[in-house]
Image (cartoon, grey):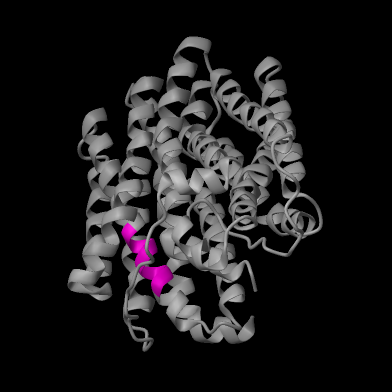
Amino acid sequence: MLKVLGTSWPLLAGVMLLMVGNGIQGSLLGIRGALEGFSTFQMSFVMAGYFLGFLGGSRLAPLMIRRVGHVRVFAALGSLISAVLVLYPVVTDVWAWSVMRVLIGFCFSGVYVTAESWLNNASSNETRGQALSAYMIVQMIGIIASQILLNVGDPSGFVPFILPSVLVSLAFLPILLSATPAPVFDTTQRMGFARLFQISPLGCAGMLLTGGVYAAMMGMAGVWGMSVGLTVPQISVFVGAMYAGGLVLQFPVGWISDRMDRRRLILLLALAGAGVMALASVAPPAFGLLVALAFVLGGIVNPLYALLIAHTNDFLPNEEMAGASAGLLFLNGLGAVAGPLATGWMMERLGPSGFFVFIAGLLGGLAVYVLWRMTRRDTPPGAPGYHPIAPTASAIAVEAVMERSDS
């Protein structure tokens, strides 16, 4: 790991700053939107915009990189991110925000594709697993730190928006000034959805559902917090607990998954998550218990993403592993776009409890589908194939994980 840090620290430092900036603006918009009088359903369009842009960026960014190169794409998208971040408090219109969120999502997707290409190229076959683990850890640490910085400045003013703009701008310095050469970019031939579903119905359905869960959690948590009267510090702790849970529980869940039928573990996690969310929807907990529930939910949903990738790999021939990554990411992205919209609709009709009801429903649906799939196919041969990866990763990191799962 020290060798990886020694060669990749500029990239990892830049990624951490990017995640701090991205994490601040995600939670901050939910808070500022409530202060501006935007409805919950209106804010769901704003939050869904990021995931729509991210989905589009994952498809178009590789074409841009092949056309003009990593450095130009990296610098152009970074400049656009910084500009949009300072425009939020200037143009306080819900539809303008929605468009800006699409732009932000598109840009961050392209930035992640570029950064992960660099990381992948700078690693050898022996160190790539450690590099990906380090990448996931700095991502999570960056987002957790962003929730602390959320308390800097008045959310009704300009300072909280200027701060992430500055951090994003600074994030590019260690990367662009690094002596590491830009890699030659290439993409793997994609697998058709029919073939992917034939190979792993659970992988496809699970990625679609967990995309909705993750986007609802991270996109609408700030909106929910404002709707129930939480303070800005409380919202920052609530959201930070979700990411902390994902960081802490990712590795223990992975260790267990390599030693049992992954479908059973997916079932147990989905049932636990659905139960926790159903309980929270019926009896709103005190703040301390709410933070504990957020930690558990994050510790369930983040590993589920990596578990579903590992489960899909269990049925894939080695030569098709990388090609399947694009399809899985696209399904996850579709679920992520729908997640905030459906959550906003549920909260408009059920009140704040709709936030928990929606997440409980998706996780419950996943558990039911896992049970059914377990009756349709035997347990695959057990083999270590789990690698920690967060839902914020782009196709490059997911492809690298899938290629490594047979090693």
User: On the rendered structure, is 369 left or right of 139?
Assistant: right
Of 104 and 165, which appears nearest the observer?
104
Which residue is painted at 31% across and 65% down in the image? Answer: 169
User: Which quadrant of the rendered structure holds the C terminus?
Assistant: bottom right
Q: Is residue 288 in view? A: no
Of 19 and 123, which appears nearest the observer?
123
x then y, percent, for residue 8: 49, 80
Secondary structure mainly formed by the magenta segment: helix
As for residue 400 lying within the magenta part, the answer is no
Reply above or below: 189 against 287.
below
x then y, percent, for residue 19: 45, 58
Residue stretch in magenta: 110-117
User: On the rendered structure, is 70 left or right of 341?
Assistant: left
In which quadrant of the rendered view does residue 274 lie?
Answer: top right
Which residue is painted at 62% across and 43% down in the image? Answer: 301
Of 50 and 82, which appears nearest the observer?
50
Which residue is painted at 67% across and 60% down in the image? Answer: 386
Of 210 and 79, which appears nearest the observer?
210
User: On the rendered structure, is 105 left or right of 127?
Assistant: left
Reply above or below: 183 against 371.
below
Q: Is residue 52 in view? A: yes
x then y, percent, for residue 373: 67, 36
As for residue 115 lying within the magenta part, the answer is yes
Which residue is painted at 59% across and 52% down in the image? Answer: 312
Reply above or below: 128 against 107.
below
